[in-house]
Amino acid sequence: MRILEVHIKSKFKNLKDFRIEFDKEAMETVLIGLNATGKSNFMEALVIIFRDLDLERSPQHGKSRNLLEYYIKYECRGKTIEIKFSIIEGYSFIIDNVILKSRPAFFREKEIFLPKHVFIYYSGLSTRLTDLYSEHEKAYYSNIINSKAKYKEFDSIRRIFLVQNIHASFALIAFFMNFGQKIEEEETKQFLKDELKIHDFGSALFIIKKPTWARPQKDIDEYWGADGLVKRFLDDLRLFALAPIYNEERIQTNYKKAETQSHYYLYLSNKKVLQDLVDLKYQNKTQLFNALESIYLSDLLFDVKITIEKEYVNKGLSMSELSEGEKQLLTVLGLLKFTKDEESLILLDEPDTHLNPLWKWKYLEYLDKVVKNPKSTQIIFSTHDPLVIGGMDKKQVRVFKQISLGKTMAIEPDKSPKGMGVAGILTSDLFGLPTILDKETQEKLNRKRYLQGKLMRDKLSQKDYLEYNKLKAELEELGFYEEVEDQWFKMYLAEMSRQEIMQKVEYTEEEKLILKNESEKAIERVKQKIQDNQI
């Protein structure tokens, strides 16, 4: 699965007549740009496109169910697929340059023409993406609660899947269970040990609550009427749990309200007990993940408290005590690792938000070595951090820029981030910072350079000279030594200091053009002086 080109024609939030092209070789593409330039909206549009293709309906969005007009071109399972949707003409499909005669012809073969999975991760607090996958969730839930449901329902992940915080706990459980893939499992455990300092799994306490849909005639022993695979998994948990306990307790639901809730405690005291449960029914990590998630989807899970053995911690540490960065890394990498599949699309919206600088720097390495995505799986992610993209080629980067009110462009940068360093990336067109220094220090530095240029031209007054020496002393204390041996550069600095706007930190587009023109003139004057032997 590889998206090649997208054109969002109708207005979709702040995107209208928006085009983006992806490099034909890059399987990982990062989206960067200022806030509100449309990165998240673009990812949301992709989810809508594939969701509604899977549901075999027109692409709907928003509370008023507006239709999204678009064109998309992508490769999937060796085929080049082009899809266009317009309100007037509806869908049109082209497969390997052949126009399909009917809409049903595409949907009959959608298992070939659509990505196997579209995974979405959004780091923000907003619930903006939850509605996008709710219909897939409902359909899956209807299947697993059926009394006649077979375990094969747990064999695969639904096509549209939103990664959520609870999945970090499920991922960690799956990480430490053995399924016969010794090399891969050892690599995973080594990663947990090296990067997260997690050495082993301790225990798991599942707290089951009375769901909102509970049937009045059903009691705790029947899980309030739960059925299908959900009930079977709870039966398995109870079979291996140490002394299951039922309790009614007062729970503070918010700062001004408490309510009595029915809870059922199922405690698996160590890793061996959980492994015995896994060996009884589950053949791979996907089946185990789906079983764990089934009680969450059924509104039966109040909490799952997992303890782990962590370096430098004498007693077991619970998942709730991990930092937000540790949970984020576990959530994203963990879920992708054991649910990965070929011909999939992975959309990560700022997956590095809570990570420390070292983990941000190594993030692409994690995706490559830990997740080991197949070559037919494309990853598109957004970030605001130069550490994450420092090793990328420009063909892997798309910069979102708002060129006018209501018009956004996505372009490939002129230079690759690789080799530029953090300071170079931040002050390049990729991020557009005027400086990596604080504004006050940069203003002092610019003022000192301006005065230094006047000094070189013998244009410095006594008052300016005193100010220059004061600034020079202050900046040298901060480590800014500007004794320049290059005489040509000294001459250039002297010429450029004729422009008083050199002392500013931030420039308007007009001022940038002035400086560019004056810089070219200054270079020509320096070259002329060299030719005239005036140095």
Image (spheres, rainbow, N blue to C red):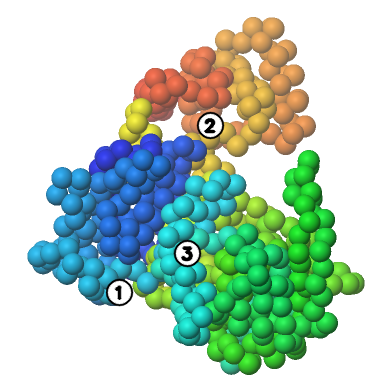
Q: Nearer the viewer, residue 495 or 2?
A: 2
Q: Residues within 10 Å of mark 1 (few under 14, many from 20)?
A: few
Mark nearer the N terminus (2 vs 3): 3
The numbered mark, 1 or 3, whose residue comes first in the sequence reads 1
Question: Which kind of residue does numbered mark 2 sit on?
Answer: Pro
Residue corresponding to mark 3: 137
At horizontal 52% and vertical 24% (from top left) the residue drawn is 506
Horizontal side of residue 338 vs 317, given as left or right: left
- Can see residue 138? yes
Residues marked 1 and 3 touching at CB (< 8 Å): no
Determine the residue positioned at 64% across, 87% down: 278
Badge number at residue 172:
none
Q: Find disc 2 in the rendering and name its residue.
A: 434
Q: Residue at x 84, y 72 (%)?
A: 316
**Image quadrant assignment for residue 52:** bottom left
Give me the C-alpha separation between circle 2 and circle 3.
46 Å
What percent of the width, then of the height, locates residue 396?
40, 57
- The kind of residue on which mark 3 rests is Glu
The quarter in which the N terminus is drawn is: bottom left
- Graded by Cα atoms within 10 Å as few (under 14), some (14 to 19) or many (20 or more), the crowding at tag 2 reads some
Q: Nearer the viewer, mark 1 or mark 3?
A: 3
First in sequence: mark 1 or mark 2?
1
Q: Nearer the viewer, residue 451 or 60?
A: 60
Number of the front mark, 2 or 3: 3
Relative to residue 278, is residue 248 drawn left or right? right
Task: Please tell me whether residue 25 is drawn above or below residue 498 in the rendered image.
Answer: below
Q: Which circle, 1 or 2, is nearer the viewer? A: 1
* Circle 1 residue: 111
On the image, which quarter does residue 202 sit in?
bottom right
